[in-house]
């Protein structure tokens, strides 16, 4: 996963002028998050650019924009060691961590569905995916047709899960040794299994 590096300081015998702090990252004219996500307060659906986005870039109601928008910060904004190549409008996708804190989500611009496959980005996603076989995390690429579970061995495509579905991943034995698997368990099956478990416990 992306990591944060910390600048080291040392004490000189002669006082040096105070070091200038690097400017905090700003969205600038990048507004890809205003396109790839649902914004319920504005009844905006994912894949459509928010009507508040200005033609020259930026939010036309900045300061009054929904709380959901105010609280969101992509990983490019959060991590100093991610250079401009990773800015969402340059990359063609937004990086974020899912609530579990161990799943890296790559939310793709539907008008640039294959940009994440460009060598610089794809090679790094594969490196980050090395946590998957050890059950320490996941890298998921959300594309218009569904999602890819990125693993060091192969990329596993699944149709987009529906609300309440569960994504199950792991490693399993095969004729060719241990291989990754990914499957979606429908919400109806999850409810049924939970109901049976409750009955057994009762």
Image: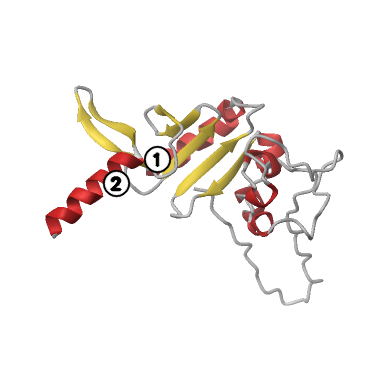
Alpha carbon of mark 2 to alpha carbon of mark 1: how far?
Answer: 32 Å
The image's mark for residue 191 is 2
The image's mark for residue 4 is none
**Tag 1 secondary structure:** helix
- The image shows residue 104 at horizontal and vertical percentages of 49, 45
Residue positioned 25% across, 44% down in the render: 192
Q: Is residue 102 above or below residue 107?
A: below
Q: Is residue 83 above or below residue 93?
A: below
Residue positioned 62% across, 38% down in the render: 46
Q: Kindly report which numbered mark, 2 or 1, lies closer to the viewer in this rendering.
A: 2
Q: Is residue 30 above or below residue 198?
A: above
- The image shows residue 160 at horizontal and vertical percentages of 46, 33
Q: Is residue 102 left or right of residue 41?
A: left
Residue 34 location, quadrant? top right
Q: Is residue 192 left or right of residue 28?
A: left
Residue positioned 27% across, 36% down in the render: 171
Residue 163 location, quadrant? top left
- The image shows residue 89 at horizontal and vertical percentages of 71, 37
- The image shows residue 155 at horizontal and vertical percentages of 42, 28
Q: Is residue 21 above or below residue 54?
A: below
**Tag 2 secondary structure:** helix
- The residue at which mark 1 appears reads as 130
- Compare residues 109 and 12 and report the one nearer the observer: 109
Sooner in the amino-acid sequence: mark 2 or mark 1: 1
Q: Check the picture and name the quadrant holding the C terminus.
A: bottom left
- Compare residues 186 and 103 and report the one nearer the observer: 186
**Dot 2: within a 10 Å radius of its alpha carbon, few (fewer than 14), some, or many (20 or more) residues?**
few
């Amino acid at each position: 996963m992306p990591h944060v590096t910390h600048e080291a300081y040392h004490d000189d015998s002669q006082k040096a002028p105070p070091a200038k702090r690097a400017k905090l990252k700003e969205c600038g004219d990048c507004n890809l998050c205003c396109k790839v996500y649902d914004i319920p307060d504005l009844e905006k659906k994912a894949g459509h650019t928010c009507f508040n986005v200005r033609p020259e870039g930026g939010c036309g109601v900045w300061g009054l924009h929904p709380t959901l928008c105010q609280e969101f910060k992509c990983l490019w904004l959060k991590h100093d060691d991610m250079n401009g190549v990773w800015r969402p409008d340059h990359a063609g996708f937004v990086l974020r961590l899912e609530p579990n804190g161990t799943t890296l989500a790559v939310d793709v611009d539907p008008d640039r569905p294959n940009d994440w496959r460009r060598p610089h980005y794809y090679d790094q996603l594969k490196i980050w995916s090395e946590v998957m076989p050890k059950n320490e995390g996941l890298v998921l690429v959300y594309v218009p047709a569904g999602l890819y579970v990125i693993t060091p061995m192969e990329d596993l495509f699944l149709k987009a899960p529906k609300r309440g579905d569960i994504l199950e991943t792991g490693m399993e034995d095969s004729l060719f040794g241990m291989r990754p698997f990914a499957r979606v368990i429908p919400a109806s099956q999850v409810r049924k299994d939970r109901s049976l478990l409750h009955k057994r416990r009762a």
